[in-house]
Every structure is written in structure tokens, then in C-alpha cells.
Image (spheres, rainbow, N blue to C red):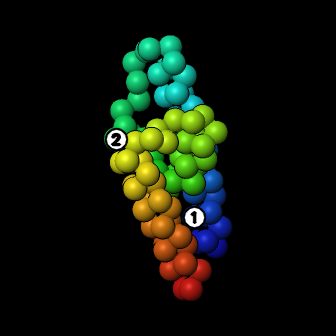
Amino acid sequence: MVVTWLLGYLMIVSLISFILFGIDKRRAIKQLYRIPETVLLLSAFCGGAFGGWLGMQVFHHKTRKIKFKILMPMAMLLIVIVLIFFLNK
């Protein structure tokens, strides 16, 4: 039951993170107000790392930033560890 809720939560947060990366890329192109990098990374560490990583690849956004190259995989690893923990309960 908890795993089902957790997976649902992760899917929603990943979708939100993916959308945030798309919005920020569009704003970057149009030279408008940007979404802060801390918000993008926070969305990843709140469970949206897989959506954020997918957004980086699809929109070709933040792929050169070393901060994102390091922290996005760390967030993904954290999510996997949490999932393994709840699956073994």
C-alpha cells in the first residue's frame, strides 16, 4: 500500500519536474524571468529526479552545468535507495 502511494507521488513529482525544465528552457530562449536552479534541483530531490533528468535530455537544458551533472544522479540514487527501503519492508 505504501509503495503504491510512493510510486504515485514519484510519478507526479517527476512530471512536475519535467515540466519545470521545459518551462525554464522556453524562458531561457525567450530571455524571460527564469526558474531558479535551486527550485529545479529541489524538485529533483523531492522525488522528481527521473523527470528532471528526462527534461534535461529532452529539452537539452542544464546538461553542461556540472552542478546538474553531479546532483541529478545523486537525487536519482536517493530515490532508488528509498524505493528499495520501502520494498523490503
Q: Residue furthest front?
A: 64
Tell whether 40 sits left or right of 51: left
Does the rendering let one see residue 5? yes
Label 1 crowd (10 A; few <14 / some 14-19 / many >=20):
some
Q: Is residue 62 above or below residue 33?
A: below
Q: CA distance from mark 1 to mark 2?
A: 23 Å
Q: Is residue 11 above or below residue 40?
A: below
Tell me the residue at 41%/29% (across/down).
35
Does the rendering let one see residue 13? no
Q: Position of residue 7 (x, y in %)?
A: 62, 63
The mark found on residue 38 in the picture is 2
Q: Residue furthest bottom?
A: 88
Query: From the viewer's perspective, is the residue at label 1 or at label 2 nearer?
Result: 2
As rendered, which of 14 and 5 lies closer to the eye? Answer: 14
Which of the two labelled residues, at mark 1 and mark 2, occupies the earlier sequence position?
1
Q: Position of residue 69 (x, y in %)?
A: 43, 51
The residue singled out by tag 1 in the image is 6
Tell me the residue at 64%/39% (across/down).
58
The mark found on residue 44 in the picture is none
Q: Position of residue 34 (x, y in %)?
A: 40, 24
Mark 2 secondary-structure assignment: helix
Tell me the residue at 57%/31% (across/down).
22
As rendered, which of 84 and 8 lies closer to the eye? Answer: 84
Q: What's the amino acid at mark 2?
A: Thr
